[in-house]
């Protein structure tokens, strides 16, 4: 009888030790926990591959910046791929400049109450188109990266704020040359730094 009690006690101790040991073993992460950890990784990635930060957030101080992307062509012509990426980046720059000009005009329009004048809207459209062709002549690629996974080429394309600002002012003056009163109103609004504010938003 004593042997039976002793065996039972030893068995109970062994089971308790087993459960205690299991309690110390790290519990494997669930898929949900693993996914949560991945979501906190804010590093820039392209197609799951770590990439330079500018490929996700193009920004260069004192300039308007964009990213141009081009796939590798069938002939493996890197010069053509670079030209295509540059063209893509310039298109993105043109779009940015157009938006900035549009925002500038809208700000002026709202603050001066000149919304009903057809010449105002015509000037806005004309300035946007003019700038897209003139300012991009000074654009350039300042950095590049090729994805090791897809062989896509990424170019960081920029154009300095200074010539853009000068071209904006010149184009606006030309557009308003037949409406001196409107141009004077615009100059007064520009003095509040609206143009500079729009250019400073580049890449943000």
Image (cartoon, rainbow, N blue to C red):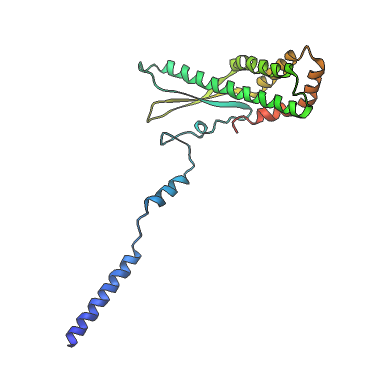
Q: Quadrant of the N terminus?
A: bottom left
Residue drawn at 55 percent across, 30 percent down: 58
Instruction: Judge from the rendering whether residue 159 lies leftward or rightward of residue 120; answer left or right.
Output: left
Identify the residue at the far bottom of this view.
1
Give the residue displayed 54% in from the left and 20% down from the top.
91
Q: Can residue 87 be spotted in the picture?
A: yes
Q: Is residue 57 left or right of residue 4?
A: right
In the foreground, 115 or 69: 115
Instruction: Please determine whether, in this image, residue 47 is positioned above or below residue 124.
Output: below
Q: Position of residue 25 (x, y in %)?
A: 33, 62
Q: Position of residue 87 (x, y in %)?
A: 51, 18
User: Which residue is drawn at the image coordinates 82% and 18% (left, top)?
Assistant: 181
Kindly give the residue lying farthest to the top in the view shown: 178
Locate residue 125: give its quadrant. top right
Instruction: Between residue 104 and residue 18, name the one nearer to us.
Output: 104
Q: Position of residue 81 (x, y in %)?
A: 43, 18
Q: Give the total number of marks visible in the rendering.
A: 0
């Amino acid at each position: 009888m004593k042997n039976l009690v002793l065996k039972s006690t030893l068995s109970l101790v062994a089971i308790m030790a087993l459960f205690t040991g299991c309690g110390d073993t790290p519990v494997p992460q669930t898929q949900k926990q693993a996914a949560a950890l991945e979501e906190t990784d804010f590093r820039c990635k392209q197609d799951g591959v770590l990439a330079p930060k500018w490929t996700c957030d193009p920004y260069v101080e004192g300039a308007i910046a964009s990213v141009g992307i081009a796939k590798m062509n069938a002939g493996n012509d890197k010069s053509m791929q670079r030209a295509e990426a540059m063209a893509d980046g310039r298109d993105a720059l043109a779009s940015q400049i157009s938006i900035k000009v549009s925002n500038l005009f809208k700000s002026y329009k709202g603050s001066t109450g000149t919304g009903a004048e057809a010449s105002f809207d015509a000037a806005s459209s004309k300035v946007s188109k003019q700038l897209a062709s003139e300012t991009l002549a000074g654009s350039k690629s300042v950095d590049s990266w090729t994805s090791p996974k897809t062989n896509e080429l990424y170019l960081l394309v920029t154009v300095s704020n200074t010539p853009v600002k000068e071209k904006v002012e010149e184009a606006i003056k030309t557009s308003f040359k037949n409406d001196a009163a409107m141009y004077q109103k615009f100059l007064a609004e520009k003095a509040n730094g609206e143009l500079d504010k729009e250019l400073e938003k580049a890449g943000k």
